């Protein structure tokens, strides 16, 4: 898969990332110096129970650390679960604001139909976001992890 | 009490071994079925999500089509109004 090829474990270590956990669905690593948490999805779909459990583990990492940026590499995804995305967007991101995590960098698969599907859903979800979150959160889309780190 | 014949002891041991093997296979079978059911549930959830994505895309396309129609009508009306104002 492109996402896995893009940043292998050895590459992550070389860049100073430390692996937090890896399972069938995702690989999560963090970089204390850059204050970055990176979540690379590894499958074309993540069932909601695993999605939430994964983010609970990431929450624990963020709550006990000092992180300002979250990079969500979704290039392996081909289907997204709308309620999961809504929970992530409306609940998780706002919850993490309390711990200083305000920068979100997202990497989507290079597929126009997928990007359009995400844009349609985002339009619906973004309207439900609190004005405080809209003001404070810095959300951007990137093409790769290196760009996401720098931007 | 006389000791049982050797053939009986061999048979008893073999029976015990087969019973244990049967139990092992039963547990293995149940684990595989459970894993398959889990995978099936994931696939069902994925198919539902794909349906939902398709529905959103079609709803969006329908909305765009309606907006386009309304926009065209507006243009036609504007042109008509412009013509009338020139006369």
Image (spheres, coloured by chain):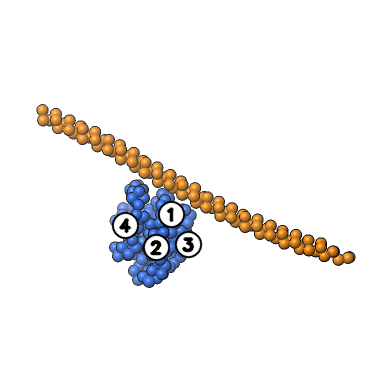
Chain colours: A blue, B orange
Q: Are marks 1 and 2 in contact (CB under 8 Å)?
A: no
Tell me, yes or no, if residue A38 can be seen here. no
Point out the frontmost of discs 3 and 1. Answer: 1
Q: Earlier in the sequence, mark 4 or mark 1?
A: 1
Q: Residue at x 33, y 41 (%)?
A: B61
Mark 1 or mark 2: name the one nearer the start of the chain: 2
* Relative height, residue A70 to residue B64 (above, below): below
Residue A141 shows which numbered tag? 4
Q: Which mark is residue A119?
A: none
> Same chain for marks 1 and 2?
yes
The residue tagged 1 is A44
Secondary structure under the numbered disc 3 in the rendered image:
loop
State which quadrant residue A136 falls in. bottom left
Q: Earlier in the sequence, mark 3 or mark 1?
A: 3
The quarter of the picture where residue B4 lies is: bottom right
For mark 1, give the secondary structure.
loop
């Amino acid at each position: 898969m492109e996402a896995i090829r893009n940043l292998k474990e050895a590459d992550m270590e070389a860049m100073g990332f430390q692996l937090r956990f890896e399972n069938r669905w995702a690989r999560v690593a963090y970089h204390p110096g850059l204050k970055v948490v990176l979540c690379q999805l590894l499958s074309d779909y993540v069932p909601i129970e695993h999605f939430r459990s994964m983010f609970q583990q990431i929450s624990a990492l963020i709550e006990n650390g000092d992180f300002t940026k979250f990079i969500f590499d979704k290039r392996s995804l081909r289907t997204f679960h709308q309620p999961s995305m809504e929970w992530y967007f409306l609940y998780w991101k706002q919850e993490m604001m309390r711990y200083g995590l305000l920068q979100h960098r997202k990497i989507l698969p290079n597929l126009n139909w997928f990007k359009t599907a995400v844009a349609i859903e985002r339009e619906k979800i973004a309207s439900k976001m609190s004005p405080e979150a809209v003001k404070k959160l810095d959300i951007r889309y990137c093409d790769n992890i290196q760009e996401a780190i720098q931007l | 009490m006389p000791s049982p014949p050797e053939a009986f002891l061999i048979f008893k041991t073999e029976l015990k071994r087969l019973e244990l093997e049967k139990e092992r296979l039963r547990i293995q079978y149940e684990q595989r079925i459970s894993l398959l059911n889990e995978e099936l549930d994931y696939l069902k959830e994925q198919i539902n999500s794909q349906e939902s994505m398709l529905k959103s895309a079609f709803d969006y396309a329908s909305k765009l089509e309606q907006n386009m129609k309304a926009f065209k009508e507006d243009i036609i009306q504007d042109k008509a109004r412009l013509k009338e104002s020139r006369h």
